Image (cartoon, coloured by chain):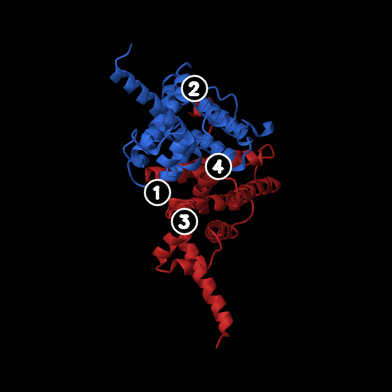
Chain colours: A red, B blue
């Protein structure tokens, strides 16, 4: 039998995780500001006091929600990409997993970080700082993989990793935005084509070209 | 002297416009949901009743705010682009004016429509429908200009206008997102370069190529 104190801690951790999983889903659709202890207590059929005990303040709840979203993003998007070989393969996996996580609606409100950054970009404070740091790290991860592809000679040295990462990141965010706003999935093939074309244009092989080599090819 | 009733109407229109200009600015940064009659009354040193009289409900206020943002977007972005010749010139002007409107901070919260779509994409109703319709019209305008450039033989017939519009739209939204979240302007040159490269790659002249024609050019 577990000692009571340990059981208590395990149970508290489990409850906290359950609360946070609901919190992430609500926040992705209705915003982190819409996340109140009362709202969570109602959804979870818990007392307000019981729910509040897990978080010291609304900001603590928001920060814990962002942390949970980060963990889910890592499980769904980042870790599976580690299965792919470094360089172009992993870069493609990172982008495809990210698109897939939006497309299969892991969170009701689409990409949690796109929603959170739009909501908090004009609200200085710890939540915005955390969202910005995580997003910057992801953008940095894309850049690093591009630079790695260059070191493997898979991509041309003349490609600017920051520029290409900006473009690739933009395509996934645009697909998320269009899917959520227009409620149709036609933006996903556009994003996939843009990603494939951009990577092909930057790669040594350049097998799929945006521009025909000779005029006569058109 | 104006008849009293007409004066009254003029004055009401003027006050309504003043309220809405403040409303657009607040909504761009803090969201349309954060827009309360009370908040507006405080900012404008008006009575709540006086402010409320101009709008029947919160939704009416939100819809009127979106309408005002549309008018400002038309003045700042759309109409000045009509000065440019149709085709690639006008397409470039549309995108550059849009970037400029974000960069010079016409609204405190960056692009009003990017903020409003992120906020309302999971909230069905008249506000979301209006934001979606306006955004779709703008995206359609970019597509039309691309198709027009093709009809002028400025762009290759093989370019898919919906695909190219998706990519160009994505670059400006990405710049807005990065500028607002990271509070630095380094995304603007990235967006400008991506726009210039994409348009050049799609154009007949294709003077700025993403891919060297021959391997030896690298």
Residue occupied by mark 2: B88
Tell us which disc is closer to us: 2 or 4: 4
Q: Residues within 10 Å of mark 3 (few under 14, many from 20)?
A: some
Provide the residue designation for mark 4: A122
Using the rendered image, report if marks 4 and 3 lie on a common chain.
yes
Marks 2 and 1 sit apart, C-alpha to C-alpha, by: 35 Å
- In this rendering, the label closer to the viewer, 4 or 1: 4
Give SS at disc 4.
loop
**Labels 4 and 1 positioned on one and the same chain:** no
Mark 2 or 1: in front is 1
Label placed on residue B122: 1
Label 2 is found on which chain of the structure? B
Alpha carbon separation for disc pair 2 and 4: 34 Å
Between the C-alphas of marks 4 and 1, the distance is 20 Å
Q: Earlier in the sequence, mark 4 or mark 3?
A: 3
Residue at numbered disc 3: A35
Q: Tell me, yes or no, whether dots 2 and 1 are on the same chain.
A: yes
């Amino acid at each position: 039998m577990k000692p009571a104190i340990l059981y208590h801690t395990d149970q508290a951790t489990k409850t906290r995780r359950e609360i946070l999983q609901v919190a992430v889903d609500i926040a992705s659709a209705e915003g982190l500001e819409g996340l109140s202890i009362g709202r969570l207590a109602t959804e979870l059929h818990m007392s307000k006091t019981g729910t509040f005990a897990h978080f010291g303040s609304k900001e603590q709840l928001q920060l814990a929600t962002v942390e949970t979203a980060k963990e889910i993003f890592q499980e769904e998007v980042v870790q599976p990409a580690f299965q792919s070989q470094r360089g172009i393969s992993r870069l493609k996996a990172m982008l495809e997993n990210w698109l897939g996580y939006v497309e299969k609606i892991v969170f009701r409100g689409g990409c949690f970080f796109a929603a959170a950054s739009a909501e908090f970009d004009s609200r200085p404070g710890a939540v915005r700082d955390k969202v910005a740091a995580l997003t910057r790290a992801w953008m940095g991860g894309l850049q690093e993989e591009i630079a790695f592809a260059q070191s493997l000679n898979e991509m041309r040295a003349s490609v600017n990793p920051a520029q290409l990462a900006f473009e690739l990141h933009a395509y996934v965010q645009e697909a998320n935005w269009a899917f959520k706003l227009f409620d149709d999935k036609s933006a996903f093939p556009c994003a996939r084509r843009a990603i494939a074309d951009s990577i092909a244009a930057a790669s040594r092989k350049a097998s799929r070209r945006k521009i025909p080599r000779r005029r006569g090819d058109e």
